[in-house]
Amino acid sequence: MTEHEQPVVRDKRRVRFDPVAGAVPGTPAAGSSPPSTESQMPPTDGKEGEELRAENARLQALVAERTSDLQRLQAEYANYRKRVERDRALVRDRAVADALSALLPVLDDIGRARAHGELEGGFKQVAEALEAAVAKLGLVAFGDVGDPFDPTRHEALMHSYSDEVSQPTVVEVFAPGYTYAGLLVRPARVAVAEPTVALPEAPQGGSESPATGGSPASGGEPNTQQPLSEGQET
């Protein structure tokens, strides 16, 4: 092909043409509008219209009922999933708390060794590493002198009275308590002091001697006068 020749395009598609209608079958003729959907709708008056409206109302009520059921099932599933996740977290926390409780005697020995000045050398490094590890896991110690006594968190091993406190107070800590993730692993073992209660005064009538004589304890003479019997002259 030379440079002056134009490309030739051949369309081999076959188009059926209706010589009477002057258009391709199945397509609207030029200038005509598409058929209205209103003409295709069934009549809504009379008995058929009432039946259609009743059926429409029934279907709408059924859709509303099914929608309500789906919403209720969705809410129940959401609550179930939250409950399962909460129970799973609680089981995990309880398992960790049980594992940490096995280390509490070791922590008690470390605390006693520190109090007596025996925590030295390599033992000190190991003890500090263990305390840092359990603290990183979430183990929290509690129980100090001066804390108000709480029976849900303290275990009272000794009890006394004191004028220096105004409420039940921890005056000595034998072993600290521990919590993990809000769970009580072990209560603190303490000594508790309560305020001194003023004793009621003894009634005076019971300690005094008769009017005619004093009691031997007070240095007075004992009363030797006996009451007169009936018929005895004075």
Image (cartoon, helix red, strand yellow):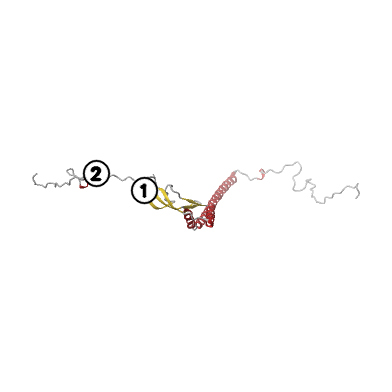
Residue 80 in view, yes or no: no
Q: Amino acid at mark 2?
A: Gln
* Camera-nearest residue between 77 and 127: 127
In the displayed structure, does residue 161 sit left or right of residue 85? left
Q: Looking at the picture, how far across and down is residue 6, in whole percent?
A: 88, 47
Disc 1: which residue: 161
The residue lying toward the viewer, choosing from 219 and 41, is 219
Q: Going 39% across and 52% down the picture, which residue do you hit?
A: 158
SS for callout 1? strand
Spot occupied by residue 135 in the image (x, y as percentages of width and height): 53, 52
138 horizontally vs 13: left or right: left
Numbered tag placed on residue 204 in the rendering = 2
Callout 1 amino acid: Tyr
Q: CA–CA distance between discs 2 and 1?
A: 27 Å
Which quadrant is home to the C terminus? top left
Q: Quadrant of residue 40?
A: top right
Residue 232 image point, x, y percent:
9, 46
**Are circles 2 and 1 on residues that touch, CB within 8 Å?**
no
Q: Considering the numbered disc 2 on the image, is that residue within a helix, a strand or a loop?
A: helix
190 sits to left or right of 92: left
